Image: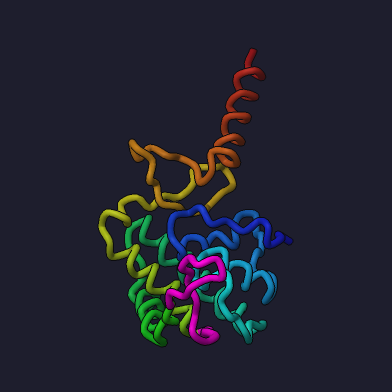
Amino acid sequence: MASPHDLRFDCGRICLDLVATTGDPPAERLAGPEHLTTWLVGAGVVPHAGPLEGVDGRWVARFRALRELLRRVLHDELRGRAGDADLALLNGIAEAAAPPAVRAVRATDGTLARALPAPPDCAGLLAVVARDAVGLLTDTVARGRLRQCEGESCSLLYLDTSRGRRRRWCSSEVCGNRERVARHRRRTAGR
């Protein structure tokens, strides 16, 4: 099982970072409430010092369900068109609750920091992620940058923000390196 240290926050959007909490081969990175809490803070859904109470197995199950919905919708959109029923589910989650309000507060060192006025509820945090996905799907520029990793055993989605829009892998250090090593082995095996 993956540890919370395996969480990725480099996909370009909050919704894509949630989808990255599982992958091929199946690696569950939202294994429990503590992993979900780590993800919520790491993805910026809640501020680092934000009050986060009540995260339990039900929250984990709801975020996993949203993750699977996002995975279907995003992959289907890359292949052509997401189903209307899935889009209705996504819109329903985005509309179900108001996202938590974030305030600017003075930190002890005098700088401004983000803070929540009260602990957020699960539906509000799900709405943040769902609204991010709706924003991605409806922004033609961002949507045009959505890619699936070309790594042999990777189905991760990311936004290609490279200069020439020719990025092939979710991570040059991981999937890109695997591909370069495999290519090198094929060349040397042929000699």
* Quadrant of the frame with the C terminus: top right
Q: Is residue 170 left or right of residue 35?
A: left
Name of the residue lying farthest toward the left? 140
Q: Is residue 177 left or right of residue 134?
A: right
Which residue range is magenta in the image?
103-122
Q: Is 96 located above or below residue 76 in the figure? A: below
Callout count: 0
Which residue is rendered at x = 66% and y = 56% of the image? Answer: 6
Which residue is rendered at x = 33% and y = 36% of the image? Answer: 164
Q: Is residue 116 left or right of residue 174?
A: left
Residue 56 placement (x, y as % from top left)? 66, 83
Residue 1 shown in magenta:
no
Q: Quadrant of residue 49?
A: bottom right
Residue 99 placement (x, y as % from top left)? 42, 81
Residue 120 shown in magenta:
yes
Q: In this view of the protein, which residue sits in the foreground, 21 or 24?
A: 21
Which residue is rendered at x = 43% and y = 74% of the image? Answer: 104
Name of the residue lying farthest toward the top? 191
* Quadrant of the frame with the N terminus: bottom right
Residue 39 placement (x, y as % from top left)? 59, 67
Q: Does residue 121 show up?
A: no
